Image: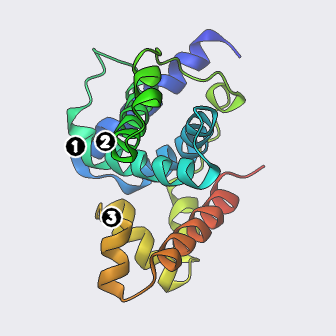
Amino acid sequence: MKLDSVNHYRLSTTEDILRIARSGDRACFVRLFMDFAPRVKAYLHRQGLSAEAAEDLAQETLINVWRKAGTFDPSKASASAWIFTIARNLRIDALRRERHPSLLAEDLGTSLTEPKTPEEVCVGRESERDIEKALSMLPEEQLEVLRMSFFMGRAHADIAEELSLPLGTVKSRLRLAVAHLRTRVAGP
């Protein structure tokens, strides 16, 4: 891949975050989610979290990207570094809550490096119509929890309480929705 392709990729990610900040562009968020959720999950898993905990924190990371897009400053950090910093900070917060001081001290001493994965190099963007079509194909119960979680920024426990569902059901519906979007939008 040529260097200009990598720069274009970084600018596209930056532009997606800026569009989310300016207008709450959901298609940009879906693209970011599809691109970064698996990478953030892999990063968190490599940092010692279980697959389930890594997935939960990856989803929380992307929710924070949606909520905090207005605070992103491309002159201070690349979009990717900003997203992985959010993930790292959430992991530190989780460790604090679990009261693992030895792991916390170890984590604070590490530096953040962006993972070098094929996903970082490849640019596989689908059109907004494909994203909307994929969303329209979701069962209503999955679409409802996806909207509440990612577009409204609601915590999983709050969604479960509001919908009178077990927390595990909410998380399962989110996972199914994300898997559906991944297969419909990501393509081969």
Looking at the image, do the residues carrying marks 2 and 3 touch, with CB atoms under 8 Å apart? no
Q: Which residue lies furthest to the right in this view?
A: 188
Q: CA–CA distance between discs 2 and 3?
A: 23 Å
Q: Which residue lies furthest to the top in this view?
A: 3
Residue 142 placement, left or right of 123? left
Name the mark on residue 19. 2
Identity of the residue drawn at 64% across and 63% down: 179
Q: Give the mark nearest the N terminus, 1 or 3.
A: 1
Q: Mark 1 points at which residue?
A: 22
Indicate the secondary structure of the residue bearing disc 3.
loop
Name the mark on residue 155. 3
Q: CA–CA distance between discs 2 and 1?
A: 5 Å
Residue 3, position as x, y percentages in the image: 61, 10
**Front one among 55 and 128:** 55
Identity of the residue drawn at 33% across and 62% down: 151
Indicate the secondary structure of the residue bearing disc 2.
helix
Location of residue 41 (image quadrant): top right
Amino acid carrying label 2: it is Arg
**Front one among 47 and 147:** 47
Amino acid carrying label 3: it is Ala
- Image quadrant containing the N terminus: top right
